Amino acid sequence: MDLGVDDVAQRASTGDLPVEEHVTSLVAAAHARERDNTRGVVADYIPVLAEADPGAFGVAVVEVGGSAHGAGDVHRRFSVQSISKAFVYALVREELGHALALEEVGVNSTGLPFDSVMAIELNDGHPMNPMVNAGALATTALVPGSGAEEQWAFVARGLSRFAGRTLELDPVVHASEAATNRRNRAIAQLLESYGRIDRRPADVVDVYTRQCSLLVDAHDLAVMGATLADGGVNPVTGERVVSAAVCRDTLAVLAANGLYERSGEWLFEIGLPGKSGVSGGIVTVSPGKAGIGTYSPPLDRAGNSVRGQRATAFLSRSLGLNIFASAVHTSAARGAV
């Protein structure tokens, strides 16, 4: 789209969260409301994920000023899985720039499952967006580095900067996924056949599998989300990780594509950019306000955490985070011309 606004500065209008004590009480309430919810099924197509405790549940909120709030299992670690797509995309977008990232990876929804091969064929080999596996593999192939090890170091370092601490690889998860990721290997080879990646498909898949196997917790996700919410500055470390323009682009992609084929419903009901992963994590971003991180392994049919969605929906409403919500400002304004 050529909209002719490149010379117009981007302004932000975000507002504030309630006082900290109120945020703390609402996070506790979100956890209490869903603690006994047993709906959903733990993912088992990756064998090691089937071992997750279905009762584990944590809710965390980190404000752009650095204040942290949590309830439940906020420090129980799990593999980041597809949530890594959002942050690797941000790192690559920082390197490539707006126009090239749009051209190479795209931003449009496929309307099909995250691991769809049909979506690639229907779109002449274009990966369409970075939140499906084809787009994530195409994004990973664009990570700077002379080889897979340099690329992996770039990814691990970058995601650690988002989290504000050094993230570790879970070797058990990596081994389990590497033994069962035949579909991702096929997708990478298909992308290569269309000229969409110019690295060895096996190397691209390995780097992607490793990034999905990094260990995080709900608090980490909230910090990572808060970094995107605060224009690219980590609110805990004070380090600039990416630019404000990269955050804007990343959040736009998440709003359209972050919850697999349920992304439209998520945006309609919750009204915030977010990204889920099949290990049970969800990161949600309220621009200018906070990041929300949740963890609960039981998933719905699309691969999104049941309790995580419901807790986030509660916080979106009770904290006034929905970016589409509005109210009459004053009675005087309502009658003004």
Image (cartoon, helix red, strand yellow):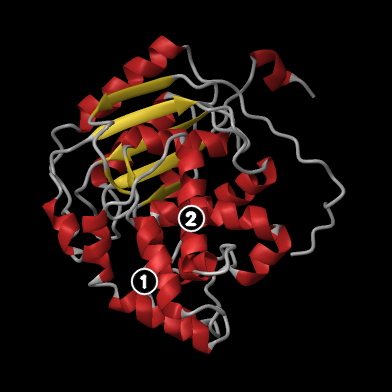
Between circles 2 and 1, the one closer to the viewer is: 2
User: Is there any visible trace of residue 47 in the rendered image?
Assistant: yes
Front one among 118 and 79: 79
Graded by Cα atoms within 10 Å as few (under 14), some (14 to 19) or many (20 or more), the crowding at tag 2 reads: few
Which quadrant would residue 220 be assigned to in this image? Answer: top left
- Label 2 vs 1, first from the N-terminus: 1
Which quadrant would residue 8 be assigned to in this image? Answer: top right
Q: Secondary structure at mark 2?
A: helix
Which quadrant would residue 315 be assigned to in this image? Answer: top left
> Would residue 269 be found to the left or right of residue 287 on screen?
left
Report the amino acid beneath label 2: Ala
Q: Position of residue 130 (x, y in %)?
A: 51, 63
Report the amino acid beneath label 1: Asp
Q: Position of residue 186 (x, y in %)?
A: 37, 82
Front one among 183 and 3: 183
User: Is there any visible trace of residue 258 in the rendered image?
Assistant: no
Q: Residue at x 64, y 15 (%)?
A: 330
Contact flag, marks 2 and 1 (Cβ < 8 Å): no
The quadrant in which the N terminus is found is: bottom right
Label annotation for residue 177: none
Graded by Cα atoms within 10 Å as few (under 14), some (14 to 19) or many (20 or more), the crowding at tag 1 reads: some
Q: Does 315 sit above or below residue 189?
A: above
Q: Position of residue 72 (x, y in %)?
A: 22, 27
| Real-space Cα separation, disc 2 to disc 1, in angstroms | 25 Å
Q: Residue at x 66, y 57 (%)?
A: 95
Which residue of the protein is positioned furthest toward the bottom in this rendering?
193
Label annotation for residue 153: 2
Q: Residue at x 29, y 41 (%)?
A: 308
Q: Secondary structure at mark 1?
A: loop
Q: Does 330 sit above or below residue 273?
A: above
Which residue is label 1 attached to?
115
